[in-house]
């Protein structure tokens, strides 16, 4: 069977056109709102580009949260995470014995007796030379 096309009345056609106009106005309003939100986002975060907006932020914007608000929350969380990592690093540095690199201590060799009388701070300061001295002492 073939589809039968029913002619529409002029009133039906007018109603269809009115619905289409309403839909187009909604789309235009949505696009205007998105442009305004993007303008606010770029004012608050001038270095942002459309390609660099995280997917999580875009998803929140699709769910109705203004994109600038979603990005601000994202940026603040990232900042807090960085501060937390920095605090952990500082706490770990305070517990650390420090670097093993030579920091300008003695350039000569030490005897075993000299090494045995050194404090931990002196050994740390002269670590490279202490190790070299111990290696030389083993060869003798």
Image (cartoon, rainbow, N blue to C red):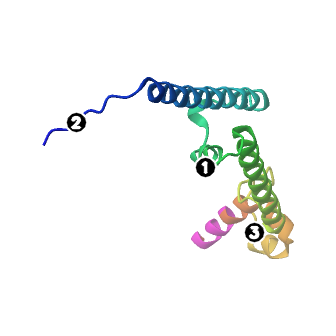
Question: Which disc is residue 118 wearing?
Answer: none
Labelled pair 1, 3 in contact (Cβ < 8 Å): no
Q: How far apart are marks 1 and 2 (CA)?
A: 48 Å
Does 120 sit left or right of 133 as displayed?
right
Q: Earlier in the sequence, mark 1 or mark 2?
A: 2
Which residue is under mark 1? 56
Residue 6, percent across and down?
A: 30, 33
Q: How many labels sit on residues?
A: 3
Which residue is under mark 2? 4
What residue is drawn where x is 82% and y is 65%?
91
Q: In which quarter of the image is the N terminus?
A: top left
Q: Is mark 2 on a helix, strand or loop?
A: loop
Disc 1 residue crowd, few under 14, some 14–19, many 20+, Cα 10 Å: few
Which residue is under mark 3? 111
Q: Quadrant of residue 12?
A: top left
Give the answer, above or below, for where 16 lies relative to 125: above
Q: Give the range drawn in magenta.
A: 132-139
Q: How far apart are marks 2 and 3 (CA)?
A: 108 Å
Q: In which quarter of the image is residue 30?
A: top right
């Amino acid at each position: 069977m073939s589809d039968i096309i029913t002619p529409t009345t002029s009133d039906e056609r007018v109603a269809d056109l009115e619905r289409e106009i309403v839909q187009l106005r909604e789309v235009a309003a949505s696009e205007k709102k998105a442009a305004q939100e993007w303008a606010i986002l770029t004012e608050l975060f001038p270095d942002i580009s459309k390609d660099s907006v995280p997917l999580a932020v875009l998803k929140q914007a699709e769910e109705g949260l203004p994109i600038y608000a979603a990005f601000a929350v994202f940026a603040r969380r990232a900042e807090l995470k960085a501060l937390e990592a920095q605090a952990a690093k500082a706490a770990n540095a305070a517990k650390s014995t420090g670097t093993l690199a030579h920091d300008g201590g003695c350039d000569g060799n030490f005897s075993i007796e000299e090494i045995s009388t050194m404090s931990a701070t002196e050994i740390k300061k002269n670590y490279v030379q202490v190790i070299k001295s111990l290696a030389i002492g083993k060869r003798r």
